[in-house]
Amino acid sequence: MALPVEEWRLCAAQRWAALEPALRKRLEAASLRDIVHLGCDLLRPEVEAVVLRRLCRRARTGKEPAAARFYREEGNRLFGRRHYAAAVRLYSQAASHEVPGSPDVSICFANRSAALFYLGFFEVSLEDIARAESHGYPARLLPKVLLRKVECLLCLGRLQDAADTLSVVENKIDVDGNVTSPTHQTLLKKVNQLKDKIRERESCPEPAREACAAVQRKSESWEENASISGASSSLSLKSDRERGRHLVASQDILPGQSLLKEEAFVSVLCPGENFPLQDSSETVWDARVTNADLYCHRCLRQLLASVPCHGCSYAKYCSQNCAEVAWEQYHRTECSLGPLLLTLGVFCHVALRTVLLAGFAEVSRLVEWSHNGGKDLHNPKARCRILGEAPDARAGTRGISGCDDYGRYQSSYQTVFSLLPHAEKHSPEHKFLCLLSVVAICKQLQEAGLEAAVLNQKSSEEGSKPNTCEQTLGELSAELKTLAEAMLRHVLQLQCNAQAITVMQESGSGDGAVVKKKPVRLATAFFPVLSLLNHSCCPNSSVSFSGTAVTVRASQSIPSGQEIFHCYGPHQCRMRAAERQQLLSQYFFECRCQACLDELESDVKSVVSTRNSFCCPSCQAPMQGEDMLCCSEEACAVSVSRESLTCRLGDLQQRINTALELLRDRKADQAIKMLLKCQMDARNFLSPEHLLMGEMEDHLAQVYATLGKWQEAARHLQRSIEIVEMHHGPSSVEIGHELFKLAQVLFNGFAVSEALSTIQRAEEILSVHCGPQSTQIQELQEMKTCLSDLPRSILQRI
Ligand SMILES: [Zn+2]
Ligand SMILES: [Zn+2]
Ligand SMILES: [Zn+2]
Ligand SMILES: [Zn+2]
């Protein structure tokens, strides 16, 4: 997903292998600038460009009437079966394929407004009704939609607006109604019913609903650093040869304290695994949803009633505002490039969007600066000015790369540009693949007549004409070469500096009382300030996201002087040191964190390997050894090959998946039977602390919860929590999520005092990792309020 599709990678690899050895040598040693100059003609129009065009045909981002029809019919079908949430999604997919301003798209919005109404989203339903009207909804159908508007207004308590709308409907019916038609009669009947309802509501007004008493949330103390934007004042920026740039605590820090709050400089939504890439010969539309259907293309907020891009079927937004801002900033250029960007992968897409956001003037300034050896970027005048006023406190940071004249490090294009591309460490093949990919983007910008718009964004009005200079078609202009060089730099930087934005996404059917969530990679982004943190496999901070913003919190006390670490992925609780080092090699460094030192250099066994181990099939004692495992109990003498045990583990995993499918098909009893059987088998060869043991308990809890058997569910969850705690520690975010589930189960089962104490524990842990404002904390507080509001009589009965 981050990299181009496999076929394009192969194509580039073949091209590389067939290059003259002398040229390959030159490319290997060349600077980014020279790579672009040497390489921009290596994408041959009749060979590589053809392959790429063919691959692009598989990623469908255009508006297709057949798709619109499919999704609308599918939506109607589910609407009929009262699956309103699914219907909303399908109508959204249909709307993204319809031509803007056509009656068809207005019908999608009108249908969606109906489904939203039944789901109780009255405000959003009203927005869709307004959208339907503005897109030319057929006049003869309008009364019905307006009646829904009246109902929404009624539900929202806006009686005057409801009455006004109702009289508009009445007029319409009078003017163009065929008095004898049955529809006319039904409409009239409905109008009269609504009139009665309004009168009724007016005569006995509901007590004005109190503005939802916002739960008093502890406001976090936050003082921003004077020289690092988005960082807390309790940090300072340091740089040395061994660690590069890094952040250090300049005072003692408490667990849960916010360390960084940063908005991504750029972020691109990942299409997700479900995104269909298929050859056009076998067009099959399916109702699967992708990230593009679930999250706003710009701000990553979860979508309910999405606003489609007027040019493509891919980009969908949470609001008209997001659609307009995205169009102004980058989508104007990206819209027609959709298939190419999906084919080349998210890193290339981030690289393009980065230069679009920066603007060509800034890109060209920094590229030129890098050609001059990366010195003297600073404006001498500015330096004179600050000498007079800046206290010397920042003098220490002024020389650090990425800092401006004032010694300030800010989220800006300059700081993104200053991230290390490690050009000399990437393999030459990989650099060549990235080169061909960015050249392909530049060529397409040229062919699509977008060059002028990209290079001179200010005057990029609709009227901008394709560049008609006397260039031979296919040759890149000097400006586009500058752009290609910057993009190549960014693609290479991403390998070390890409930050995944993750969210907890609901998985499974979602109709269980206990929501099962798993972390999902939502987008890839540049966070220049977050990038200052070095990696550790046992980090002292925790990262959470909200939309495109990241917050880093201390996950433990950090004494003054200690470096702040963040885990890039390979955590000591999830992998052994050797695996971690393997994964970290993509960042071109060898991890020297305490966990790695302990594991690699002394005899400390990895937490993972001791806990996720096999046990003796005969006596259940731990097994020892590498390829051939022997029982640690001398008298027992059983030995088994690792291979056969691994095979057994795989088989077990498969049966667990089958059980989960049964659960999805609402065959809970069969699922329980199967999971219990799996558990029995597992006890014969897995150590009791094995993570899979915990997962099975967790699944069982989920099944029991769907049956409303709260006590059983709680019992299994408690066992799962014990195992998770052994692996991740008692104050880890993983334990926080498990306790959250347990709190839900106890809450649903009215186990009041247990629920309250679990809520308390979950709150303490989750607020350290996710902050007091996260949705999970809010949900916990709502549960708490609800429990303390329970009438005493009920409590006594329980
Ligand atoms: Zn948005
Ligand atoms: Zn678009
Ligand atoms: Zn490490
Ligand atoms: Zn044994």
Image (tube, grey):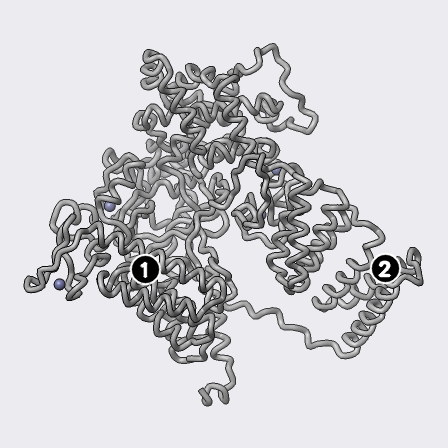
- For this rendering, which residue is in front, 3 or 82? 82
The kind of secondary structure element at disc 2 is helix
* Residue at point 19%, 56% (across, down): 610
Q: Residue furthest left?
A: 635
The percent position of residue 253, horizontal first and vertical second, equals: 31, 55
The percent position of residue 309, horizontal first and vertical second, equals: 64, 41
* Residue at point 49%, 17% (across, down): 44
Query: Quick one: label 1, few (<14), some, or many (20+) residues within 10 Å?
Result: some
Q: Is residue 764 visible?
A: no
Q: Identify residue for label 1.
A: 732
Quarter holding the N terminus is top left
Where does ligand 4 appear, by image quarter?
bottom left
- For this rendering, which residue is in front, 35 or 201? 35
Q: Quadrant of residue 147?
A: bottom right
The percent position of residue 611, horizontal first and vertical second, equals: 22, 58
273 lies left or right of 206: left
* Above or below: residue 764 compared with residue 639: below
* Residue at point 64%, 49% (across, down): 71
654 lies left or right of 628: right
Q: Earlier in the sequence, mark 1 or mark 2?
A: 2
- For this rendering, which residue is in front, 401 or 285? 285
Query: Quick one: label 2, few (<14), some, or many (20+) residues within 10 Å?
Result: few
Q: Identify residue for label 2.
A: 168
Quarter holding the C terminus is bottom left
Instruction: Report the amino acid beneath label 2.
Output: Val
Instruction: Report the amino acid beneath label 1.
Output: Ser
The kind of secondary structure element at disc 1 is loop
* Residue at point 69%, 58% (across, down): 125
Q: Is mark 1 within 8 Å of ligand 3?
A: no
The percent position of residue 649, horizontal first and vertical second, equals: 28, 56
